[in-house]
Image (tube, grey):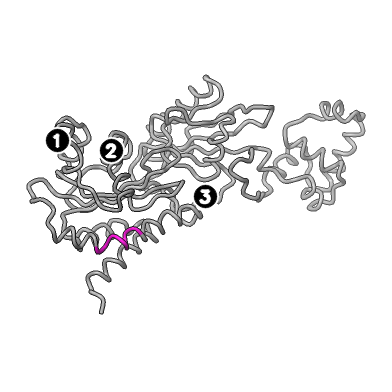
Amino acid sequence: MPDVAYSKTVERIFDGVLDGRLTTQALRAIAEYVGVSGAGCALVNQFTRRVSRAAWWGSFNGSPADYVNHYSKIDPSRALWDEALASGTFLQVSASLPPALLRNDEWYNDWLLKGGVCDILGANLYESPSHKMSVGLYRAVGEPSFSPGVMERLQELTPVLRNAASLQVRLIEIGWRSPIGNGRFDDLGTGVIFTDAGGEVVETNRTAERILRIADGLTIRDGQICARRNFETAKLASLIASASASGSGSDLSAGCMLVARDCGRSSYIVRVAPVRAGLASHDPPMAMILVSVPDRNRISERELAELYGLTPAESRIAIALAQGKRLTALAVESELQITTLRTQLSSILKKCEVERQSDLVRLISNIPVIHPRPNETEHL
């Protein structure tokens, strides 16, 4: 018959995987079963190389926001956990890093020790091309070293922890869970990018990752989001700083801008907003950047014709007007008389049951559109 404590611990672990609100309870169950004073976990985005989520329970009293925004970037234990994944065992900070390094290390002295912990037993449990998950067990300052019993119970629980980490990452990859926003952004055709106050990219949805990988207008340089032109980068940085400073999320948006792209493609429409409390697993300051491509968010000529009974020529004119073109420019492009186009426009307005050209543009812009998910290398 399975041990009751073991079964309950396994149940809590997988509850934490399926519901991010139960992560702390899962970490408590791990720590109490193994017999240590605390436990923590971190999720790393392989694309940005940033820790996008961190949580802990027990003896450690540091802030998750401080770790994600600063100390995770200088944390020497992150390399240890990579070694632990390769070796298949948990590694101990005090036994694996040179004492001389720890004596002078900012992360160890200003973060770990000041937070009440003197040692960690940790490992990366699972990694994929998109994310990797680590877990650590804490030894509080003044406590004796990890006992053989701790190591034995940890070894017993390790297969469960690895399976849970694998499930966590796979759920993220299929869009069922998201490190930020609880899965609400991966199915959007709009790119969603989360940055810290300095513009360093913390997490993205899949659309945004494709946009940044293509590097056509927006990209990551030295960890920071950048635009194609220097003045656009400066304006974007200013909007991010403004959104991050608002913290409370009281303003719907810090502002919006256009970002130019190559080869005459439609500019990205970029809106920057504060991250509201509870959206991320750690506290602000953070900014959320929404990136959309106008042409991809507009109904096709064929569908518009089907909806309103337009001829192919009328549908082409209506879409062109919604894209911001003028009748005079269309007359030149199509080599038609302006009077002919005005007659066609009058027919379009009647069929669409609107009175003015501005009403027609608004109507087309508000028609919901679904696009198939593009391949990784497909240009947006």
- Position of the N terminus, as image quadrant, is bottom left
Work out whether 46 lies above or below 159.
above
Q: Secondary structure at mark 2?
A: helix
- Residue 171 locus on image (x, y percent): 45, 57
Where residue 28 sits, quadrant-wise, is: bottom left
Q: Which residue is mark 1?
A: 99
Amino acid identity at mark 2:
Asp
- Position of the C terminus, as image quadrant, is top right
Pick whichever of labels 2 and 3 is earlier in the sequence. 2
On the picture, is 39 further left or further right than 261? Answer: left
The span from disc 2 to disc 3 (Cα, nearest Å) is: 26 Å
The span from disc 1 to disc 2 (Cα, nearest Å) is: 24 Å
Q: Secondary structure at mark 3?
A: loop
Query: Mark 2, residues whose alpha carbon is within 10 Å: few (<14), some, or many (≥20)?
Result: few
Q: Tell me the magenta residue range.
A: 156-162
Question: Which of label 1 and label 2 is nearer to you?
Answer: 1
Q: Which residue is mark 3?
A: 186
Front position in the image: 172 or 132: 132
- Residue 23 locus on image (x, y percent): 31, 56
Q: Report the disc number at residue 40.
A: none
On the picture, is 301 further left or further right than 175? Answer: right
Query: Mark 3, residues whose alpha carbon is within 10 Å: few (<14), some, or many (≥20)?
Result: many
Q: Report the disc number at residue 66.
A: 2
Q: Which residue shows up at 61% across the image and 27% down it?
A: 260
Pick whichever of labels 1 and 2 is earlier in the sequence. 2
Amino acid identity at mark 1:
Pro
Front position in the image: 161 or 283: 161
Where residue 116 sits, quadrant-wise, is: top left
